[in-house]
Image (tube, rainbow, N blue to C red):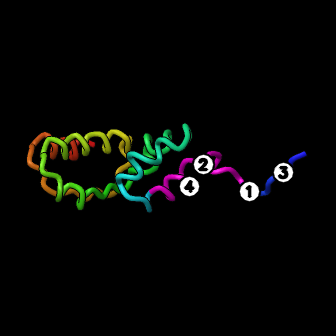
Amino acid sequence: MEKESDFRRWDELIPDALGLIFRSLSLQEVLTVIPRVCKSWNKVVSGPYCWQDIDIEEWSSYCRQPEKIGRMLEMLIRRSSGSIRKLCISRLQKDTDFSLIVEK
């Protein structure tokens, strides 16, 4: 018989706690690695828990395609579900991007 563990499984943590942990990871890890770990982690990074403070300033300053910045901004704002408290981004060029930020 297997001994019962006193530790909680990572996939059973509440989404807010996982979101706080995931905020310390890089943007690339949160968007590409974490969603593949398990369904519950994918759900957390697809929802607002990780996107209340959005800082893509470094990424956007190196991105050479303005339309890519706009798409990233749109995706992250959508994921935040209106819960954004802070947004750091560089090189916005379209009025539609500014309008999206103001609306949400």
- Camera-nearest label, 3 or 2: 3
Which labelled disc corresponds to residue 7?
Answer: 1
Query: What amino acid type should be assigned to the residue bearing mark 3?
Result: Glu
Q: Earlier in the sequence, mark 3 or mark 4?
A: 3
The reply to whether dot 2 and dot 4 touch (C-beta < 8 Å) is yes
Q: Quadrant of the N terminus?
A: top right
Q: Which kind of residue does numbered mark 1 sit on?
A: Phe
Q: What residue sits 14% from the left and 41% below the top? A: 67
Q: Residue at x 84, y 51 (%)?
A: 4
Q: Which residue is denoted by mark 2 in the rendering? A: 14
State the CA–CA distance, disc 3 to disc 2.
21 Å
Residue that label 4 marks = 17
Callout 3: few (<14), some (14-19), or many (20+) C-alpha neighbours within 10 Å?
few
- Tell me where the magenta segment starts and ends, as one range: 8-22
Kind of residue at badge 2: Ile
Q: Position of residue 83 (x, y in %)?
A: 38, 48
Q: Which residue is mark 3?
A: 4
| Spatial CA span between label 3 and label 1 | 9 Å
Furthest-right residue in view?
A: 1
Residue 10 included in the magenta stretch of the image: yes
Q: Position of residue 100 (x, y in %)?
A: 21, 41
In front: 53, or 61? 61
